[in-house]
Amino acid sequence: MQKFALLITVLLFSTACSEFSQHSSLNESHQIRFSHDAQDDEFRPVANATVAEEEGAIEQTGTKTVSNTEWNVYKVTLGEDGQRTVSFDGSGSHDPDHANETDAGITTYEWKVLFDAPYGDDSFDLDGHTFTQSAASGGLWSYSFANVTVDSTGDLENEIRIELVVYDTAGNFSEKFRMYFVVEPFGFGDQEPEFQFDMTLNGTTVTSDTILVNGSLVSGSENGDVYVEVAFFEENFSASAVAKYNLAVESLWAKSDALSDGEAFSLTLSVAEMYTNASSNQYVYIKTYEGNFPDEAWTTIHWFEFTLAACQGLVAPEAAIEAGGEFILDENGICQWDGAWTYDPVMDAWEEPEPQYEATFSLDIPVEAKVMEDDFFYINGTILSSTQEETYIEVAFNNSSFEASAVEKYDLRLIHLWNRSDGLPVQSPFSLGLSVESLRGNITMSYTVYVQAYVYDAQDQKIVTDEDSFEIVVPYLDTDGDGIADDFDDFPTDATETIDSDGDGVGDNSDVYPNDPSLWEEVSDEDSESNTSLPGFESWLLIFALILATRFQRKLTL
């Protein structure tokens, strides 16, 4: 009886377990479809999935053994936006009962995400989140990770588990296919590269053809893939490969080799074609980053500034600049000196020009030649301009007088045939006198008056700077104004007489006997008779005078 009861108990327990198993199968199945093999389905479907790996974003780091099965473990690195979407492919899942049929026999893909919570947060739902996809999805599914599952040191971590369960047409479901994910934040475990730059050029003036950008990578190159680029314009960093190649040929852009911690770099840029005739400021941009395009990380732009010297440092003497010179660019863009001074680029030598001395004046003179009625006259004028503090004016009737010796000039000055001013500043008037007294003759003459301006150089040498001249008329000398020049007038002060033919001192106009020196006026009859009654009167008078003189001499002898 006891055996029978025990048999009945076993039978009842088996029936209950069978019903419980069928109930569980129905509960886990979201979609039960019966096909042609629903009655004779022999095998459970098989779930299989792969992950679309991406360097630096999603990478397999190892495996994890669960129930004697090795499951892949992946590291997910979030993007700068704090998320990372990962693509899954479950199309490799299949139902062995459909081995000879065209479709895989999978009707449903059930993806479950478990333990997706930040590290240290235990408030997550233990049942996870389920995402069901129909056969139309082809087994493709994606999921966005956002929770970081590692601690700040990276030594401790949690894993997010993703499972795939597939259902066949008979409603049977597969074993769970598992994958594990560790999520790190953007840049986690990747230290920002730290550089040390040689900033010697910053703020300096450059005169060389090239400049060097030097520095070293201190730390942050975990994989030896840190780079440095340099250029004169920031936009060159985003240029195409062809454009960068052309810039590199001209040494206007340069890139270092891949750098590891502690390695130095030295990049050359050319400034030879950037000089002008004026100084200018120029920036140098330095781009540092880790990785390769388009996955560059830790991109940073640095810069420094320097001054390009005018004409590549060629500096003119101050005196050359003050003389009005300057550097200009010729048609080839080459600096050339333009000015009174000269520059020899081969010898790097400057040569001062011969001193330029200038002084000008103006004269106050009539348009027509002046007739000199008076002997003495003045030459008047004004100093208009001068390169020296003092300008001198000389005047003379002969150009040769300007070159005469000091003694000769002294003598000429005494007779007023040469004269000179003191040193005069600009805008000073001058008035120098000359005399034509010694120039007057028996005919009217025209004379040239010469005027000369000059200055003295540093060696006290006379430098003639300006000259002018004008004409004067010197009429003959006629003191009494009778129209006869004094040289031809026997009576230059008597306008009534001009000739004394017999030389008796009486002008012909007043001399009754102009050709008889003994008579010059009319003689009366009485005077005439007295003269005729004593013929030879003058002779007798002379003899008488001689006799008296002889007798007087004898008395003196006795």
Image: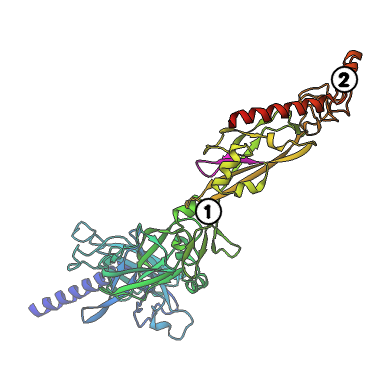
Q: Nearer the viewer, residue 237 or 476?
A: 476
Q: Nearer the viewer, residue 410 or 468?
A: 410
Q: Nearer the viewer, residue 81 or 425?
A: 425
Residue type at numbered disc 1: Pro
Residue 368 on image: x %, y %: 77, 33
Q: Are marks 1 and 2 in contact (CB under 8 Å)?
A: no
Left of 394 or right of it: where is 212? left
Label 1: few (<14), some or many (≥20) within 10 Å? few
For residue 104, what is the image quadrant? Answer: bottom left
Query: Number of marks in the image?
Result: 2
Residue 176 in view, yes or no: no
The mark found on residue 355 in the picture is 1
Residue type at numbered disc 2: Asn
Image quarter of the C terminus: top right
For residue 499, what is the image quadrant? Answer: top right
Residue 317 on image: x %, y %: 45, 56
Image quarter of the N terminus: bottom left
The mark found on residue 399 in the picture is none
Q: Which residue is mark 2?
A: 531
The residue at 52%/37% (across/down) is 422
Magenta stretch in the rendered image: 384-396
The residue at 91%/16% (across/down) is 529
The residue at 73%/26% (across/down) is 545
Q: How is the image coloured?
A: rainbow
The secondary element bearing badge 2 is classed as helix
Residue 332 in view, yes or no: yes
